[in-house]
Amino acid sequence: MLTGWRDFDDAFRAIDLLQRRIDRAFDFWADPSPSDSAVMDPQRRGLLLGDRWRRRATTAWPATNVYEAKESFIVKAEVPGLAESDISVSVEDDVLVLRGERKSQAPEGYKVHLRERASVAFTRKLPLPARVDVEGVTATLTDGVLTIALPKAKDALPRQIAVQAA
Amino acid sequence: MSDMAVRDNNGLQAKAYGGRTVAPPVDVFENADDLLIIADVPGVRNESIELRVENGTLTLEAKHQTPKEELPALVREYERVDFVTTFRIPAGIDTGAISAETKNGTLVVRLPKAAAAKARKIAVQ
C-alpha cells in the first residue's frame, strides 16, 4: 500500500535492487567467451565507471582492476581456479591481452548438486592508457589473483622541467 | 541423500552490494564416498580462511586481514570483499573427518560420508 512519497521511493528502491540481482544473475551465466571489453579505452571508461551496477553488467570475465602508480600500471584480475599454465598474458600493439580457460566441470565420477562457478574461456583485450616498456612487464599469480605490472615507457613518464631564469 | 548441502542463507548474495561481505560462488559435488564443496575466494590468503562445524552447519569465512593497498584506480571492476557462507551438513557425514585445502584462490572442502551412510551391496546367500 502506497501512502506517500516515501513509499514510492521505497518501491523504486526495491525494484532497483531486484533489477541488480537479475542483472547479476544474468551476468553470471552470460556468454563465457566475450572478446570485448576495452576497459582501458577512455571512451568506455566513463561509461564503465559511471554507474555501479551497469558496470557490473557490462564486465567480462575475469573482473579486472587497473591501478596507476608513478612509473607503472598495475592490472589485477580475479581468476580463482586458474593455474599459471591456464593463463597467457601478452602485450600486442599497446593492448594487454589476457587469454585463458577455466574448466570447472564436476570431477570424474561426481554428480552435481550446485553449479555456480561457470567454466569460462576468455580473451580480454585491454588497450593500455599509455606506452609501456614491454620488456619489463611481469605477471604473478597469488591466491587466484593475477597481478600484472607494466612499467611505463620512458617517454610516457612524467618529466620534471627545470624553470630557468631568463 | 539427494538434498545434500543445501545452502542455508537463501538470501543469496544478500549483502553483495551493501557491504563488504558476499557469499562466494560455490559448486557442490557428490560421489559415493564424499561431498565436495568448491568455493571461489580470490585474493584471500590461506591462513585467513576459517571453517567451522557447529550444530550441523558448516560455516566458511574468508576474510582479508591485510589493509587494502591504495593506488588510484583507473578501472575498478571488482571490489575487495570478504566471503562468508553457511551450509547445512546433511545426515550421514562424518563431521570429524571434514578436510579442506586451498588452491589458486579456490577453497575445496571434502566432507566424507560416514561408513554407515555409504551404499553397500549385500551379498545374497
Image: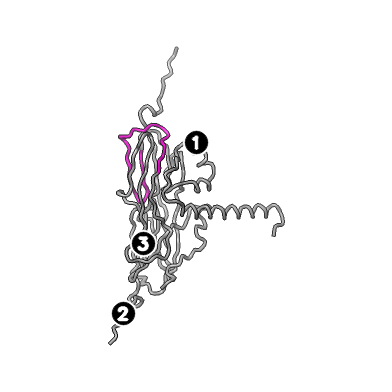
Q: Residues within 10 Å of mark 2 (few under 14, many from 20)?
A: few
Q: Quadrant of residue B94?
A: bottom left
**In the image as oriented, which residue stretches furthest toward the right?**
A3
The answer to whether residue B37 is above or below residue A90 is below
Q: CA distance from mark 1 to mark 3?
A: 40 Å
Q: Secondary structure at mark 1?
A: helix
Left or right of A115? Residue B32 is left
Q: Chain of mark 1?
A: A
Disc 2 target residue: B121
Q: Which mark is residue A12?
A: none
Q: Where is the C terminus of chain A found, in terms of image quarters?
A: top left
**In the image as oriented, which residue stretches furthest toward the top?**
A166
Q: Which mark is residue A43?
A: 1
- Does the residue at mark 1 contact the one at mark 3 (Cβ under 8 Å)? no
Q: Which residues are magenta?
A: A124-149
Q: Residues within 10 Å of mark 1 (few under 14, many from 20)?
A: few
Left or right of A138? Residue A20 is right
Q: Residue at x 33, y 71 (%)?
A: B32
Q: Residue at x 48, y 55 (%)?
A: B21
Residue nearer the viewer, A87 or A142: A87
Check residue A143 for magenta coloring: yes
Disc 3 target residue: A106
